[in-house]
Amino acid sequence: MDAIDFPDDLVQTQAAWNATYDALAASRPRDTTALRHRLLRLSVRLWWHPYWKTAPSVPAARTELRQLVRAHGAARAT
């Protein structure tokens, strides 16, 4: 599958979602209510982003977005 050129705001939203999820999954997170609310807001923004109306295969594109952001985050951490 060819690499998809995702909009920057969609990539940033997915990265924020990942960071929030990781913070919530951490041992003894602080302010879980705020993290859960943020995760919900980010989930809505991801799900209803206008980009998905133009994607040829939405499920595959969503998976590729998640993989791309995870790989980019892992590369940045090293």
Image (cartoon, grey):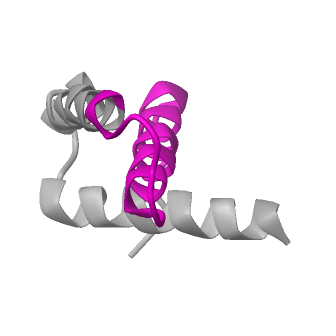
Q: Is 54 on the left-hand or right-hand side of 39?
A: left
Q: Which of 24/31 is in front?
A: 31
Quadrant location, the N terminus: bottom left
Q: Does residue 34 lie above or below 65 as drawn?
A: above
The answer to whether residue 78 is seen in the rendering is: yes
Q: Main secondary structure of the magenta part?
A: helix
Quadrant assignment, res 36 = top left
Q: Position of residue 22 (x, y in %)?
A: 46, 58
Residue at point 66%, 61% (across, down): 72
Q: Position of residue 57 (x, y in %)?
A: 16, 58
Q: Which of 32/37 is in front?
A: 32
Quadrant assignment, res 52 = top left
Q: Does residue 41 lie above or below 77 as drawn?
A: above
Q: How many marks?
A: 0
Q: Which of 65/14 is in front?
A: 14
Q: Indicate whether residue 18 is drawn in magenta.
A: yes
Q: Which of 76/6 is in front?
A: 76
Q: Indicate whether residue 17 is drawn in magenta.
A: yes
Quadrant location, the C terminus: bottom right
Residue at point 51%, 48% (across, down): 19
Q: What's the magenta region?
A: 5-34
Residue at point 47%, 63% (across, down): 26
Q: Position of residue 30 (x, y in %)?
A: 46, 42
Q: Position of residue 63 (x, y in %)?
A: 29, 66
The answer to whether residue 57 is seen in the rendering is: no
Residue at point 22%, 37% (across, down): 43
